[in-house]
Image (spheres, grey):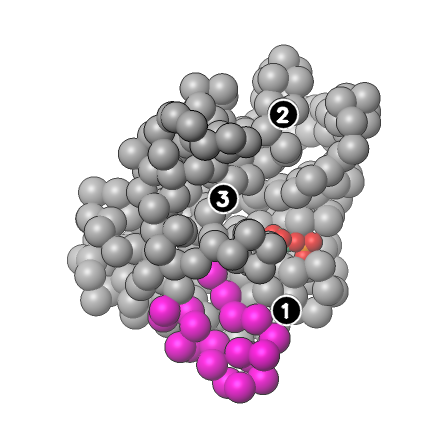
Amino acid sequence: MHKKIVIGNMKMNPASPVEFGRYLDALEKEIKGKKFEKTEIVICPPTIFFKQFLDRKLKNIKLGAQNVFWEYQGAYTGEISAGMAKASGAGYAIVGHSERRKYFGENEEIINLKLKAILKSGLRAILCIGENIEERKRNQTVEVIKKQLKGALIGIGAGKIEYIDIVYEPSWSVGSDNVPTSDEILEAKLIIKKILSENFSHKTMEKVRILYGGSIAKCFVNQVCIDPAMDGGLVGRESLVPYELVKISEMVEEG
Ligand code: PGA
């Protein structure tokens, strides 16, 4: 059985190293003395704060990147490669997040390139997929999950798939306080499994963690991280409050 995982996506927060220092003080206090045997906790702060995070040597908490570029190095002003993130202490990278799709025009082709670069660098990938509000209204959830997942996985072989955690994260839920029902989440999981089964053996597929993301808060954990069906969650806003992030992680750990 693999471990569950709770990922804190801090997005473009907090506003300064001083504030991040305060965040780490609080996180250190919250995590102290707590054991997580069944759950990994990963935080994805802005890359510029990586060293500050690592200097704290927080036990139980791993580091992830929110975004990486697909090339290894070169003349790509402003970009950071997967290899750089890995060499700077990250173990994970998020890819396919709905905000990257929406604000930065990332499509399946770009996400596929990034996913391949992440896996090649030795990072684990946290791949986000999910429908937006218009697609939901048009009843296109199944279609969108299929398209996004198949597109992202082009050229990814059986030896690599286990290094991908797939997050069903409908963009209408991100930042909204609206979450799907447990049934809707389980249905999304079934679709994901079905797509994986078209390309991978049962044994290989079982190694892939499937999570939920979007407006996760304490009050929704049992609804969206449904134990034992879901393997954890991707947490946005609530990860900015160390008490909440640790509490959510404890709830996932307890199942
Ligand atoms: P949210 O964000 O928890 O604030 O809805 C989730 C995410 O963007 O991963």
Residue 145 visible at all: yes
Element at label 1: loop
Q: Earlier in the sequence, mark 2 or mark 3?
A: 2
Answer whether labels 1 and 3 touch (C-beta < 8 Å).
no
Q: Does residue 175 appear left or right of residue 38 in this picture?
A: right
Residues drawn in magenta? 129-147
Q: Earlier in the sequence, mark 1 or mark 3?
A: 3
Type of amino acid at the residue the image marks with label 1: Trp
User: If the picture is divided into quarters, which one holds ligand 1?
Assistant: bottom right
Work out whether residue 101 or residue 1 is closer to the camera in this orientation and state it: 101
Q: Earlier in the sequence, mark 2 or mark 1?
A: 2
Secondary structure mainly formed by the magenta segment: helix
Q: Nearer the viewer, residue 129 or 8?
A: 129
Q: Horizontally, is 127 left or right of 196 in the view?
A: right
The outermost residue toward the bottom is 138
Residue at 70%, 69% in the rendered image: 178
Give SS at disc 3: strand
User: Mark 3 is on which residue type?
Assistant: Ile
Write down the residue under mark 2. Answer: 48
Queried on whether the Cβ of the residue with tag 3 lies below 8 angstroms from ligand 1, the answer reads yes
Residue at which label 1 appears:
172
- Residue closer to the observer: 244 or 168: 168
- Horizontal and vertical percent position of residue 218: 72, 54
Residue at mark 2 to residue at mark 1: CA–CA distance: 29 Å
Cα separation, mark 2 vs mark 3, equals 16 Å
Residue 56 percent across, percent down from the top left: 66, 16
Residue bearing mark 3: 94
